[in-house]
Image (cartoon, grey):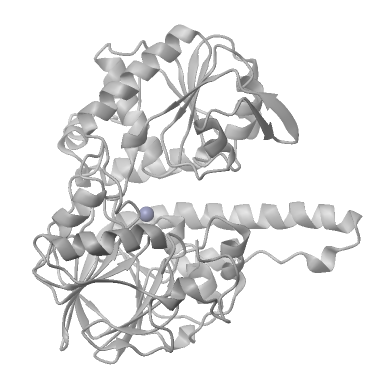
Amino acid sequence: MRLQSFGAACTVTGSMHLLTLDGWRVLVDCGLFQGSEDLEARNHEAFSFDPADLDAVVLTHAHLDHVGRLPLLVQRGYRGPVYCTPPTAALAETVLLDSARLQVDGYRHALRHARREGREDEVAPPLYEEHDVHNALALLRPVLRFGEPAAVAGLRVTPQRAGHILGSVSLVFESSGGRLILSGDLGNRESGLQPDFTPPPEADAVVLETTYANRSHRAWPGTLAEFSEVLRASVRAGGKILIPSFAIERAQTILHTLKGLMDSGEVPRIPVFLDSPMAARATHAYFEYGDELIPAVRDALHAGEDPFRPSTLHVVLTGDESRRLNRYDGPAIILAGNGMLTGGRIQHHLRHHLWKTGTSVIIVSYQSPGSLGGQLVAGAERVQLMGEDLAVRAQVHTIGGFSAHADQDDLLAFLSTAGTPHVWLVHGEVEVMNAFVPVLGAHGLKGDLVPDRQPVELLGGGFRGAHPLGLVRAGPDPKRPAGTEE
Ligand SMILES: [Zn+2]
């Protein structure tokens, strides 16, 4: 039972785990690194293995940091099956096509500027383009169903509901060496759309995500009350209400929640603009696979209603329509991407409204410190945006409870049915994982961090690589670019 992680090892992004079980080589997830320039530089590196040698690929869910390098894997020689659930296949198409478009646009933009300086040779080409995405999509095998064992290469794998986003799964692998569980990203058990994850069976080893292993989320009723109160205050303030939002899961959660609050009369029925073609496309998958969501959504769908459509919703598709919203008078809620405020249509809305006193910005997702979103959350009075220095006169509200990731209690609940497995930690910051190891110890579990790119024997064998875990942070690995340790 060997694991070698080429992403989401000692970091939260770029998930890519190579399993060798009973001689079969299975890659779980093939995600893009997102975040700092140093991390994103790793997307351009060669794979540390020959893609053609893999027996199978399995996707846990369709977030870009779990599927975003799949077109690259195919471009570099992988031709085998890519197993996933049907909703993951639907969402992966939306996510990967958007990713290709962003990369090509980014490349053209960089090239235009570099030409003026005579440096066009220095611009890296896009990682992949639309035709690479179609080649990858052609390999998808959307045959995984919750709780039903499937044959992946020569292995028996049971996907189980992970409750993170639509179609997300944990994977239970059976091998001659024992039972292994890869948690995938696990959901917050207090979620506005997802039912809870399925408790896993007893296992010999668990590879566990740890994004929020040091946190405790607010309970859902509290989050709902807080969101409702902030919306009412924002409506009273009289200006635009901007909600930066990710296109997958968060946008649908916000739409469903807004519909509920407006239908019950808790929040006035002001216009809601969904200014994100990608979120609109993703919502089709939520509609199609709504039976996998919480009972309130299922019931609404069966009654012929659209649970993601507040009665005042307008979907904004073109860039021109989006810019015309700047001239729209009166209160309105605008949902736009991207959720991190690092690009996308939310930027021009912020530029037009951040300096006005009646404006409200409601932050519903994590913002990294120092980023534009992080500065707003921290109460900055001025920010730089699109080359301008803007006064922040808007009210900025932060609602933390919409997280799609498990908190510490959720992670411990997940492990509580798994017996006494060796727990291997991935998809977390090193500080968070180091703090979680003693918590596991207090629950009678042995926890270890999965090192970056070093192979580990999951059952008792320790490390095959030259670096024991403690060195991952202490000493720079010559193969590891500087700055990726955060
Ligand atoms: Zn995810």
The quadrant of the rendering that contains the N terminus is: bottom left
- Does residue 90 sit above or below 473 in this rendering? above
Horizontal and vertical percent position of residue 464: 36, 90
| Residue 308 seen anywhere in this rendered image of the structure | no
Residue positioned 41% across, 34% down in the render: 364
Horizontal and vertical percent position of residue 89: 37, 59
| Residue 7 seen anywhere in this rendered image of the structure | yes
Number of numbered callouts drawn? 0
Camera-side residue of 345 and 441: 441
Camera-side residue of 250 and 475: 475
**Quadrant position of ligand 1:** bottom left
- Does residue 273 sit above or below 206 in this rendering? above
Left or right: 436, with 298 as reference point: right
Horizontal and vertical percent position of residue 240: 53, 17
Left or right: 235, with 106 as reference point: left
Camera-side residue of 465 and 90: 465
Left or right: 476, with 285 as reference point: right
Quadrant of res 222? top left
Horizontal and vertical percent position of residue 233: 40, 12
Quadrant of res 423? bottom left
Left or right: 4, with 126 as reference point: left
- Does residue 131 sit above or below 332 in this rendering? below
Residue positioned 59% across, 35% down in the render: 345
Camera-side residue of 173 and 481: 481
Residue positioned 28% across, 13% down in the render: 266
Quadrant of res 251? top left
